[in-house]
Image (cartoon, rainbow, N blue to C red):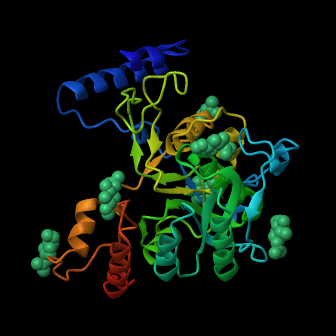
Amino acid sequence: MLEKRRYGAGLPTYPFLAACLTAAVCLFLWRLSSCPVPQATRLVAPSYLLLLPGNASSLPPPYPMHKLGPGDRTTLIDVKDFAFQLNNFPCNGSSSLLLLVLVHSAPGNVEKRRTIRETWGRGPHRVLFLLGAVESPAMQAALEEENRVHRDLVQGRFLDSYRNMTYKHVMALKWTAYYCPGARYLLKTDDDVFVNSPALLDFLAQDLSPWGARRLILCEPFSFAYVKRSYRSKWRVSPLEYPGRMYPAYCAGWAVLYSPDVVFLLYREAQRTKYFWIDDVHVTGTLAARANLTQTSLGSLVLSREQVQFLVGPRDNGSEIGSFLFGSPNLSLSDIHRLWQLVQERRPAS
Ligand SMILES: *[C@@H]1O[C@H](CO)[C@@H](O)[C@H](O)[C@H]1NC(C)=O
Ligand SMILES: *[C@@H]1O[C@H](CO)[C@@H](O)[C@H](O)[C@H]1NC(C)=O
Ligand SMILES: *[C@@H]1O[C@H](CO)[C@@H](O)[C@H](O)[C@H]1NC(C)=O
Ligand SMILES: *[C@@H]1O[C@H](CO)[C@@H](O)[C@H](O)[C@H]1NC(C)=O
Ligand SMILES: *[C@@H]1O[C@H](CO)[C@@H](O)[C@H](O)[C@H]1NC(C)=O
Ligand SMILES: *[C@@H]1O[C@H](CO)[C@@H](O)[C@H](O)[C@H]1NC(C)=O
């Protein structure tokens, strides 16, 4: 089996061999029957650390910017003349911010951005929308006008297109490292997601730590995903683009929470790793593995599509809604408005 060969290459120690055999046997049994799904996140015990006021300052700073190359500022992976065409600095002047949210948005998604500003974007967290360059001068003028009013667009010098999404994700890491190093947590999300921001802020301050964390990648992880080779797949990847048969464990890209040290480690790794266009696989999988980081599962903090449809649908019975953090992707504008109304009406008192 592929996994066995991969994990078995150049075995250094017997405990390692034992762990490999266990994993291989478990994988084998799981395929045959109902052994619990082996989650990569469970194989490596506590993968993140929470900070207390006492030990935040005794740790190495999360952003050792001097470790980046001299041309780093104007480089984005293989783009050597990178610059921000639109930029904002909402973090300047405050040394601590609990949550920074960077939202992948497409230039044309004006209504989605408006909806987020009117709903979950409000609050003590900061929300910025990430865009690539556009070819139409009229579109650029509209974006500049939108930014003049709202001051919340960040646009990078790469063409905004589907296969350029990895530039956008790495730009999120870059922007955070250069312009918002005081943020305790970074959430990378998309413009068709519902973020229960009041519950998320409580979760960060109470269930995690208001002083921040280290080595944290909190998301919905996927393990043992095969690389799609079929020409009919939207996600088809050629062996030249990605030679392996399977991806490393990676996160669903629509809601990923990073701690600052992870932002830096992934960013530095991205700057010296060959471009691969599936951004969640590349950043939260390949780069995370290279930086020796593991993903932690959000588990039941995510509402499934069915749960969202129940809540926004006609059969909703008014029962209290739990403290979920994210609603599944591809939501309509009215779904997002409705969910925002619901979480405000029915938030369990804290
Ligand atoms: C900070 O201190 C707490 C309690 O002593 C400990 O559990 C935690 O691992 C420490 N964090 C780091 C990053 O050292
Ligand atoms: C904010 O800080 C960054 C560097 O940290 C600087 O480049 C930028 O000019 C500042 N912007 C404002 C408006 O203060
Ligand atoms: C982005 O995508 C377009 C086509 O979709 C391509 O022509 C361009 O070179 C890509 N890269 C950058 C950095 O813009
Ligand atoms: C990877 O991280 C773990 C702890 O998360 C550590 O024990 C191990 O030594 C690290 N390995 C490398 C190669 O850095
Ligand atoms: C409302 O519907 C949910 C989901 O079907 C169910 O779990 C809950 O018990 C219902 N509550 C009431 C008061 O009927
Ligand atoms: C997203 O939702 C729209 C309708 O709201 C639907 O047409 C489309 O197929 C959905 N896309 C995915 C990937 O689910």
Left or right of 114, for residue 346: left
**At 33% from the left edge and 35% from the top edge, which residue is drawn?**
38
Could you say which quadrant of the image residue 80 lies in? top right
Quadrant, the C terminus: bottom left
Q: In front: 89, or 152? A: 152
Residue 178, above or below 21: below
Report which quarter residue 22 is drawn in. Answer: top left
Report ligand 6 position as a quadrant. Answer: bottom left
Quadrant hosting residue 293: top right
Q: Tell me how many marks there are.
A: 0
Give the residue furthest to the right: 70
Identify the image quadrant of the N terminus.
top left
Q: Position of residue 112 (x, y in %)?
A: 47, 71
**Nearer to the camera, 220 or 277:** 277
Q: Give how far across and how far down residue 238 sits, in percent.
A: 48, 25
Residue 270: give x, y in percent of width and height: 67, 40
* Side (left or right) of 207 relative to 82: left
Residue 260 in the figure: left or right of residue 318 = right
Q: Residue at x 14, y 76 (%)?
A: 315
Q: Is residue 249 above or below residue 4?
A: below
